[in-house]
Amino acid sequence: MIFTHDTTRLALLAALSLSYAGVCLAPWLRARAKRRTSDAAKAALANSRPWLVAYASQTGNAEELATQTAQSLQLAGIPVRLCALAEVTAADLQQAERALFLVSTYGEGDAPDNAAAFMGRLMTGEIALPQLHYAVLALGDRSYGQFCGFGRSLDAWLAAQGASRLFERIEVDRSASAAIEQWFQHLSHLAGTSDAPDWSAPAFGDWRLTQRRHLNPGSAGGAIYHVELAPVAGSLPEWQSGDLVQVTAPADPSQPREYSIASIPRDGGVHLLVRQHAHPDGSLGLASGWLTAQAKVGDVVQLRLRQHRRFRLEDNVQRPLILIGNGSGIAGLRGHLKSRVLAGQRRNWLIFGERNVAHDFHYREEIEGWHASGDLPRLDLAFSRDQAERTYVQDRLRGNADEVKLWLEQGAAIYICGSLAGMAGGVDQALQEILGRPALDALAAEGRYRRDVY
């Protein structure tokens, strides 16, 4: 064996050895990191109590709607267990806090084949379910005498066991779209406030409509209004950016509509961004019509504040933020930006999309002012109709994949606000392509991937 005291050769040999070790070690380290990320995501899901979404389907309609229901909840960041009703046990019901049942009726009031076992095993007896809050979507055909018979029986049995309804049973006659739309409207409401259920919410109070202005005249999309409200009596209550309000319309006070708050208490009132919903017959949505057209400035509006813990900044206050949204979703992101500017937190990146820059750049002057001052150093816009090939916020994400990874390596959190259909799913898919599903799930488990979608 030959030894040498040549320090240059020794250093070169050491460097080559370390390089070789690094080459060998790198795949193992990457694999270990992936395992840890995946384990963290699984642990977070195991420690949370998922919503139960159970279906009983004869022809597949209920199963398809249940799948869509589960996907909607998952996009809102809610853990879900989707299964056939036949798989649900007594222990499942006793451990669940929230359950959604989408069930068909076969023939004259009979349970579908894949629900017969559940009916015989559980619905013939009693189970104490005082902790369970549930809803039933019953599918049927009015040409039969026992319309939605099984759905009605299931609803009655659950109530008899002490379970509480999240909302009244919805019955669907031969896939009627209006009833199905009603189900998803309720679902949107529940997804928005799953951390602050109605039965623990404060009472509605009197608020005065102090200002309203049309933000997008000439837009190809629906009219959007900036609305400001202040309490009729007493001081302005406290809330945090990310929180919600519920507003009721005089025509139907039992159906409150949820809106993201676009302001902070320092602004002196609650600011909302309301898209006016028009039905095919020309009539306006109950709440949006009331707020944007029927109520006059100075009128009293019934409103209550709602904590939205899943979209608050909380432990992310000191982190860089990537804020992503479209349309009226800029409301919830505006609240966060206002809070950040007030606190002097300047590591902010906004990715916002709408139809046309000329009509649909909501709060443009304010946003461009933050960008110019350095309070919003990164601003990426996607106005889909301003070029031949439509561009959306998820495309902006893909085009800045390296920057997204860099921000996340520096500890950033991602907040998404806007439409559940299209945008939220598209953004989730883009982030999955950039980061991988395990890494994205781990961000959600850490509270660094938060969504307020509707």
Image (cartoon, grey):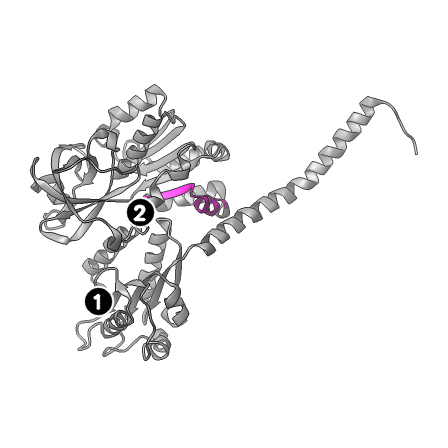
Q: Nearer the viewer, residue 79 or 179?
A: 79
Q: Nearer the viewer, residue 452 or 114?
A: 452
Q: Earlier in the sequence, mark 2 or mark 1?
A: 1
Q: Is residue 325 above or below residue 346?
A: below
Horizontal placement of 253 versus 383: left or right? left
Residue corresponding to mark 2: 420
Spatial CA span between label 2 and label 1: 26 Å
Q: Residue at x 32, y 44 (%)?
A: 452
Q: Position of residue 147 (x, y in %)?
A: 19, 73
Q: Quick check: is 443 in the magenta stretch? A: yes
Which range is magenta?
Answer: 439-454
Q: Quick check: is 341 in the magenta stretch? A: no
Q: Are marks 2 and 1 in contact (CB under 8 Å)?
A: no
Q: Secondary structure at mark 1?
A: loop
Q: Is residue 188 above or below residue 318?
A: below
Label 2 crowd (10 A; few <14 / some 14-19 / many >=20): some
Q: Position of residue 433 (x, y in %)?
A: 47, 43
Between label 2 and label 1, give the one nearer the viewer: 2
Horizontal placement of 208 versus 49: left or right? left
Disc number placed over residue 394 in the picture, else none: none
Taking the view exactly as shown, the residue that stands out farthest to the top is: 373
Q: Nearer the viewer, residue 220 or 240?
A: 240
Callout 2, which amino acid? Leu
Q: Residue at x 30, y 36 (%)?
A: 241
Q: Residue at x 46, y 54 (%)?
A: 47
Q: Position of residue 15 (x, y in %)?
A: 75, 29
Q: Secondary structure at mark 2?
A: helix
Residue 69: which quarter of the image? bottom left
Callout 1, which amino acid? Arg
Disc number placed over residue 174 in the picture, else none: 1
Residue 205: which quarter of the image? top left
